[in-house]
Each structure stands twice: as structure tokens, then as C-alpha cells.
Image: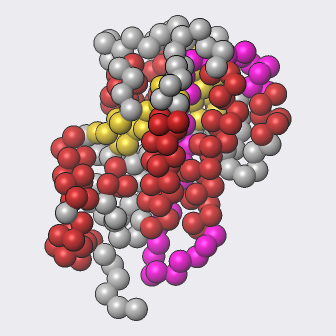
Amino acid sequence: MNKSTTISGRCIWVTGASSGLGKALTQQLAEAGNFVIASARSQKDLAELAAQYPGKIKIFPIDVSRTLDLAAATHELSEITDYLDLVICSAGICEYEDNLQFNPNMYERALDVNFLGVVRILNISLPLLKRSKMRPHFAAVSSLSTCVGFPRAEAYGASKAALNYFMQSLRADFSKVAIDFSLIRPGFITTNLVKHNDFPMPFIMTPELASQRIIKQLEARHFFIDFPRRLSWPLHLWGFFFGAWCKWVAPKLTRIHQW
């Protein structure tokens, strides 16, 4: 755990907490002296995680997809706590567009979890964030892939791009209100989402290291949390010169040569 981390003594809700980045965030925040409400679909995995931190982690098994009963989840969360200081939405899925079939079901799944899942969590958590005794904070995990259009990433990238716009609009709408927002856009992290990737993943990092960087930036209340810089800066630059990207880089990445 990064000793410079000062997020402590807070009530924090983390989704996607059973594995990968969400799990690392939950562990490090619990170790720092926070009370963490951990959510994911797998009650078994959550229970094993909570057993490692008695009294510091409370499990709250939910699926952020359309199957979520908002009224029931709101009631169950209120039974756990009457306020929240920080919410981190890290649940997500990734599917690739192979052979340009454009199956709407895949796009619906990506948008349902990666974008609408965050909307649902905000809907549930906002009343509790209002009751925080400090300035509350709402954060969501997006991706650096939204900087520029990647081949095969139409569904995943579009869902994360929608999340980007949503979080920026939230920050604008709440600009006169005492609440902070953070849009977390990491590069490649060694999680279940990327374990089947069959392409190079430059500057890939562990969930533990990524979590340390995120927590440090959350404590500083930064809105954009982009890392690693050696990947984010070139991608932002390519996004600005998108024509050059399509001419020189995309042809080397795409697997589509005819239709």
C-alpha cells in the first residue's frame, strides 16, 4: 500500500469489487482504515474478500445490469449505511467486434453494464452522498481506449465514451454543488477483462499498482485520472490527429481487409 495515501476514515462503496482493479481498490482502501461496501455479482468471492478484513468490508452482492432492482438495492444499502463519502464504479465488461457483424445484443450488453450500470449506481448512491459529513465524491472507471477509435472496440469504446460524456456533464451540472466527480481512464491492467487479448498491451500494470495511482489521484480530487502518461499522452495526440491515425496506425491494427 502506498504510504502517501491519505484516504482514511470514510464510508466507501466500490462496485466490481470481487476481482481485478475493483478488488485491489477495496483491499487497499480497507487497509487504510476505511469502511468499504463491496459489490459484485459473486457473493462467494465477496465473502472471501471480506473475511480477510473483518469489520472493514461489508459485502453487498448486486448485478449493476438491467436485472438490478433499484428500489430493493436502495433499501438494502440503507440497511448497511445512512451515508456515503465516496463511490467508485469499477464494474465493467469487454467484448470485441469481430468480422463486423454488428450484433445489437453485444452493444446492448456493453452499454448496459459500462454506462447504464454507472447511472444506476449514481441513482442509488446520490441520496447517501448528500448525507456525507465531508465533501462527497463519485468516481467511475472508463478507459484510455476512448482517446481514439481502435479497431474491434466499437461496442466497448462506445460504452466508455458515453460514460466519459456523462461524467463530464455531471461535473458541469453540479458545478455549484459541493460534490466532486472523477473520471478514471487507465491503460491496460492485468484483469479478467484483458486475459484473452491476443494483441500487444503496452505498459500493462498490475491492479495493485493501478489502484495505488487511482487512490492517490482521488485524494487530490482530480477529475481526469489518466495513466500511465507514456500511453495516455500519445493516445490523446493521435486522437487530435485522427486522420493520421487512420492512415498510418489503424491499418496495422485492423483485422478486416475486405467486406
Q: Describe residue 67's horizontal placement relative to residue 253 as left or right.
A: right
Q: Does the rendering let one see residue 45? A: no
Q: Residue at x 29, y 39 (%)?
A: 227
Q: Describe residue 246's horizontal placement relative to residue 220 as left or right.
A: left
Q: Residue at x 72, y 52 (%)?
A: 66
Q: Residue at x 72, y 16 (%)?
A: 81
Residue 228 picture location, percent across and down: 25, 40
Name the one closer to the observer, 192 or 251: 251
Name the one closer to the observer, 224 or 18: 224
Please state the total of marks drawn on the protein image. Answer: 0
Q: Which residues are magenta?
A: 76-105
Residue 207 picture location, percent across and down: 39, 36
- Answer whether residue 100 is magenta in the image: yes
Q: Quadrant of the C terminus?
A: bottom left
Residue 201 picture location, percent across and down: 28, 54
223, above or below 152, in the image: above
208, above or below 113, in the image: above
Name the one closer to the observer, 177 or 206: 177
Q: Does the rendering let one see residue 133? A: yes
Residue 226 picture location, percent across and down: 31, 39
Q: Quadrant of the N terminus?
A: top left
Q: Residue furthest bottom?
A: 259
- Answer whether residue 110 is magenta in the image: no
Q: Main secondary structure of the magenta part?
A: loop
Rendered image quadrant of residue 131? top right
Q: Describe residue 234's horizontal placement relative to residue 147 as left or right.
A: left
Q: Residue at x 39, y 23 (%)?
A: 221
Q: How is the image coloured?
A: secondary structure
